[in-house]
Amino acid sequence: NHDIISLKLYQLTVERTPEEERRDKEVYLPVVDNLKLPGMEAPLEPMSGLALFLIVFFSLVAIVFAIVIGVIVYNKWQEQSRKHFY
């Protein structure tokens, strides 16, 4: 493995005819007529009341389920930590 510490870049200037310039512009400047730019999408429709209710309801059910599982795991851990055989 090697690290690149520095680069030396040089730009050569060459005298070109207008015809060469035109030919090079056509090669180096691509044009896309049907390009969709990010952020130019149509705005999304707002959610319906039913969709919003279902998202909130299932989120709350998942949170309650996670809390119940957490309490069960915590109680099992407390039981295991109490048992000492001397």
Image (cartoon, rainbow, N blue to C red):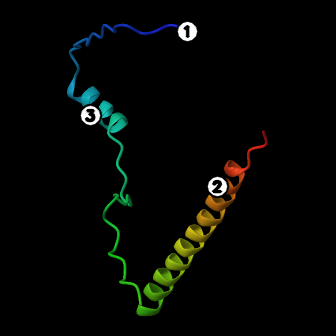
Q: Which residue is mark 2?
A: 78
In the image, 2 versus 27, the foreground residue is 2
Q: Quadrant of the C terminus?
A: top right
Instruction: Locate residue 38: give its quadrant.
Output: bottom left
Q: Nearer the viewer, mark 2 or mark 3?
A: 2
Question: Do the numbered discs 3 and 1 sit on residues whose CB atoms are within 8 Å?
Answer: no
Would you say 5 lies left or right of 79 here? left
Work out which residue is located at the far front of the displayed protein and give it: 86
Amino acid type for the residue under numbered disc 3: Arg
Distance between mark 3 and mark 1 Cα atoms = 43 Å
Q: Which residue is mark 1?
A: 1
Of 39 and 55, the residue lying toward us: 55
Q: How many numbered discs, if any?
A: 3
- Amino acid type assigned to the residue bearing label 2 in the image: Gln
Q: Secondary structure at mark 3?
A: helix
Instruction: Return the disc, 2 or 3, that comes first in the chain's sequence.
Output: 3
Disc 2/disc 3 C-alpha distance (Å): 79 Å
Is residue 44 positioned above or below 18 on the image? below
Considering depth in this image, is 55 or 4 the residue closer to the camera? 55
* Dot 1 crowding, Cα within 10 Å, few <14, some 14–19, many 20+: few
The residue tagged 3 is 22
